[in-house]
Amino acid sequence: MECVAGTTLGEFIIRQQSAFPDATGELSTLLSSLQRAARVVNREINRAGISDVLGSMEQLNVQGEEQQKLDWFANERFKEALAARGEVCGLASEEEEGFVSFSPVNTRPGKYVVLIDPLDGSSNIDVNISIGTIFSIYRRVSPLDGPAQLEDFLQPGCKQVAAGYIIYGSSTMLVYSTGQGVNGFTLDPSLGSFFLSHPNMRIPERGRIYSINEGNYQDFPTGVKRFIKHCQEDSPEQGRPYSSRYIGSLVADFHRNLIKGGIYLYPPGTNLPDGKLRLLYEANPLAFLMEQAGGLATDGSTPLLQLQPRTLHQRTPCYLGSRYLMLQLMKTLVEA
Ligand code: P6P
């Protein structure tokens, strides 16, 4: 599909939908709902220092993590936006213990379910580091005439119909895919619209960046230690060594590596035997984007998109990145 810069996200969604005659427009409306909520969350993030939304809610979320005020705010805005139009029958969120079932709008049951990390990396809010929203969309598998069921949410990542993220950074971007490649849209705050700024995003085949919390080095599997040693000793391009770049905000690390090339690693460890990242609303949507952009995504032995989820908040080891680096990593993991 021809990508014309200056195209708004809404125009792009409509043009992409017209490529599928059987499209009913419901997914397009769903994506537009996400866009509207993103604008509201973005405004609140940008005012965080002057409005009373910084800091903690003085309570733990379902993960046992201290819930930031903006975590709660973002969760409520996306939940409201997705419940309002009728395309979505249910939502699973990092901030909700169980999934939330939405009442049908105009008796028309929603065809889709959405899984979301409403504000990933929120511990970085108070220090003004980029944070993000990550979303994953599936067509429901339970009977259309009833409420959402758990099976609608526990589908393997390869069944996603769309996935993406919003990064609230030096500029605010919405990056998503419906399976026809990855496209990035930048918010023009003066107009309140997202404009196509990064058409057909492809991750560079190699890249020189590895992203991992090396503070956990002693805990890494042997293969990961060997891979890091390879990065520190080898030079992917004549004389230009690899660089270690780790922000500690998943969407920011992912977005940089998607554009510049590189690899993001969150391995298992003693205290986190399945790693830290959540399969359903962090690893799977980013794996979908990574594969759509020409990269690879694995848990160290299986492609992430092939994993059969067991529970809503299950964690997974997560390796995402440029094809060359990922093949190097997997070779090292097998040899270990
Ligand atoms: P660590 C933030 O809490 C997050 O989920 C991701 O955004 C980030 O990549 C990761 O955790 C950082 O974890 O253990 O390195 O601080």
Image: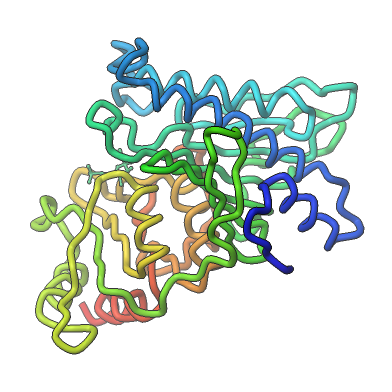
Above or below, 115 against 52 in this view is: below
- Expressed as whole percent of the image width and height from the top left, the position of residue 154 reads 59, 45
Q: Looking at the figure, which quarter contains the C terminus?
A: bottom left
Residue at coordinates 25% horizontally, 26% vertically from top-left? 126
- Expressed as whole percent of the image width and height from the top left, the position of residue 182 reads 58, 62
Residue at coordinates 47% horizontally, 19% vertically from top-left? 73
Q: Quadrant of ligand 1?
A: top left
Q: Residue furthest front?
A: 190
Asked whether, in this view, residue 320 is left or right of residue 215, the answer is right
Q: Is residue 97 visible?
A: no
Q: Residue furthest bottom?
A: 238
Question: Quadrant of the rendered structure where residue 140 is?
Answer: top right
313 or 136, nearer to the observer: 136
Q: Looking at the figure, which quarter contains the N terminus?
A: bottom right
Residue at coordinates 89% horizontally, 21% vertically from top-left? 106
- Expressed as whole percent of the image width and height from the top left, the position of residue 238 reads 19, 89
Question: Quadrant of the rendered structure where residue 89 is?
Answer: top right
243 or 287, nearer to the observer: 243
Q: Is residue 138 visible?
A: yes
Residue at coordinates 36% horizontally, 46% vertically from top-left? 277
